[in-house]
Image: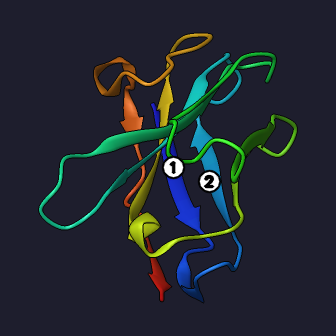
Amino acid sequence: QVQLVESGGGLVQAGGSLRLSCAASGRTSRAYAMGWFRQAPGKERESVAAISWTGSRTFYADSVKGRFTISRDNAKNTGYLQMNSLKPEDTAVYYCAAADTYYSGSFTNRYDWWGQGTQVTVSS
């Protein structure tokens, strides 16, 4: 079992930046994939970015490519999502997820554990 806690969300103006963190605890001695998802009001949850256990493989949704960067520090059991050039359409609750595997990509059903989410609001 892995517990995930996100932090770093907030209110930012368009063009600004935020850095989300995802602290993992519990059974973190084994390799696990990580991903970031978001859900806006009235919309389905969508994949934003994903990263493999070693960080050698990553995925980005087309809507965030070139603006967001996913990373992780396994020594700290923490994942990150650096979000730059934020747009109002990035407004959503952002969720961190982990999977008991090397890499899970953008597939929601391949993730085993989820955080509680952190709100990101981008004003125009």
Tell me residue 25's x, y (percent): 61, 44
Residue under pointer 2: 22
Q: Tag 1 or tag 2, which sits nearer the N-term?
A: 1
Residue 4, disc:
1
Q: CA distance from mark 2 to mark 1?
A: 6 Å
Q: Position of residue 96 (x, y in %)?
A: 49, 47
Under circle 1, the secondary element is strand
Closer to the eye: label 2 or 1: 2
Quadrant (top left, top right, bottom left, bottom right) of the N terminus: top left
- Above or below — where is 12 with respect to 114? below
Decide: is 59 above or below 96: above
Q: Nearer the viewer, residue 79 or 56?
A: 56
| Type of the residue with mark 2 | Cys
Which of the two residues, 116 or 37, is positioned nearer the viewer here?
Answer: 37
Residue name at image x 64 percent, y 53 percent: 23
Task: Give, as a three-letter code, the residue at label 1.
Answer: Leu
Quadrant of the rendered image containing residue 16: bottom right
Please say if 114 is above or below 116.
above
Q: Is residue 27 visible?
A: no
x then y, percent, for residue 60: 58, 33
Point out residue 19 in the picture as x, y percentages from the top left corner: 71, 66
Q: Tag count in the figure? A: 2
Mark 2 Cα-neighbour bin, 10 Å: few <14, some 14–19, many ≥20: many
Q: Considering the numbered disc 2 on the image, is that residue within a helix, a strand or a loop?
A: strand
Q: Quadrant of residue 109?
A: top left
Is 8 placed left or right of 2 in the picture?
Answer: right
Depicted 110 relative to depicted 69: above or below = above
What residue do we see at 52% from left, 71% from top?
A: 87
Q: In which image quadrant can residue 85 be found? A: bottom right
Would you say the residues marked 2 and 1 are in contact, meaning their CB atoms lie under 8 Å apart? yes
Side of 25 relative to 108 (left or right): right
Q: Which residue is drawn at the image coordinates 73% and 46% (left, top)?
A: 69
